[in-house]
Image: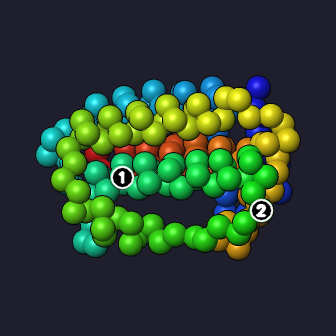
């Protein structure tokens, strides 16, 4: 069982995301948010795929792409830290990622498939981790993180953006 992280496992801005996760087992949380996200994607009407609630805001598909991109980044960081790699990892500009990913012509089904593949990979990354692997603290974007914290950050970030899609896009 991979229990919730301490607030010291990630910078302060992550605590909001930790608090969105109700499960006290990361693998359950990853599985539950996966199912909820697939249900959400299935509920998005075709006319809302490219909808943006305001000028210069991301579309529904952009938000889904952002969830996928961030999960990749968080999983990579968790992988490195779980292997006791103390190399400082750089940050990333989520807006630049979206600008350049908008060139990818993805429909909802392909985003759903990609999300499913990434989530399966994330689950397989965390399943065998030991407590020491989960709790090694590395640095990314000048802040300290553990793999445990990044796992819960992945789930909380996913929940946050799914909630945002429900309230602003549908």
Picture disc at residue 54 = none
Q: Nearer the viewer, mark 1 or mark 2?
A: 2
Residue placed under numbered mark 1 in the picture: 65
Instruction: Label 2: state its secondary structure.
Output: loop
* Residue at the image position 20 percent from the left and 44 percent from the top: 107
* Residue at the image position 23 percent from the left and 57 percent from the top: 104
Residue placed under numbered mark 2 in the picture: 86
Relative image position of residue 21 (x, y in whole percent): 64, 39
Q: Which of marks 1 and 2 is nearer the N terminus?
A: 1
Relative image position of residue 152 (x, y in whole percent): 66, 44
Quick one: 33 or 137, which is closer to the camera? 137
Quick one: 149 or 82, which is closer to the camera? 82
Q: Is residue 88 above or below residue 131?
A: below
- Which quarter of the figure is the N terminus placed in? top right
* Residue at the image position 30 percent from the left and 42 percent from the top: 111
Q: In this view, does 30 lie to the left or right of 11?
A: left
Few, some or many residues within 10 Å of mark 2 (<14, 14–19, 20+): some
Q: Pointers 1 and 2 in contact (CB under 8 A)?
A: no
Q: In this view, does 23 lie to the left or right of 93?
A: right
Q: Is residue 97 left or right of residue 20?
A: left
Q: In this view, does 73 lie above or below 125?
A: below
Few, some or many residues within 10 Å of mark 1 (<14, 14–19, 20+): many
Relative image position of residue 32 (x, y in whole percent): 54, 27
């Amino acid at each position: 069982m991979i229990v919730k992280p301490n607030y010291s496992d990630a910078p302060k801005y992550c605590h909001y995301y930790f608090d969105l996760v109700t499960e006290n087992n990361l693998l359950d949380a990853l599985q539950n948010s996966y199912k909820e996200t697939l249900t959400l994607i299935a509920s998005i009407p075709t006319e809302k795929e490219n909808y943006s609630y305001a000028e210069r805001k991301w579309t529904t598909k952009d938000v889904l792409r952002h969830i996928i991109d961030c999960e990749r980044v968080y999983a990579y960081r968790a992988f490195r830290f779980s292997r006791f790699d103390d190399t400082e990892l750089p940050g990333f500009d989520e807006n630049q990622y979206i600008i350049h990913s908008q060139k990818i012509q993805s429909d909802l089904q392909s985003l759903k498939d990609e999300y499913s593949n990434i989530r399966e990979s994330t689950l397989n990354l965390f399943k065998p981790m030991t407590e020491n692997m989960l709790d090694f603290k590395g640095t990314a974007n000048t802040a300290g993180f553990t793999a445990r914290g990044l796992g819960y950050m992945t789930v909380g970030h996913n929940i946050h953006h799914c909630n945002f899609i429900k309230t602003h896009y549908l």
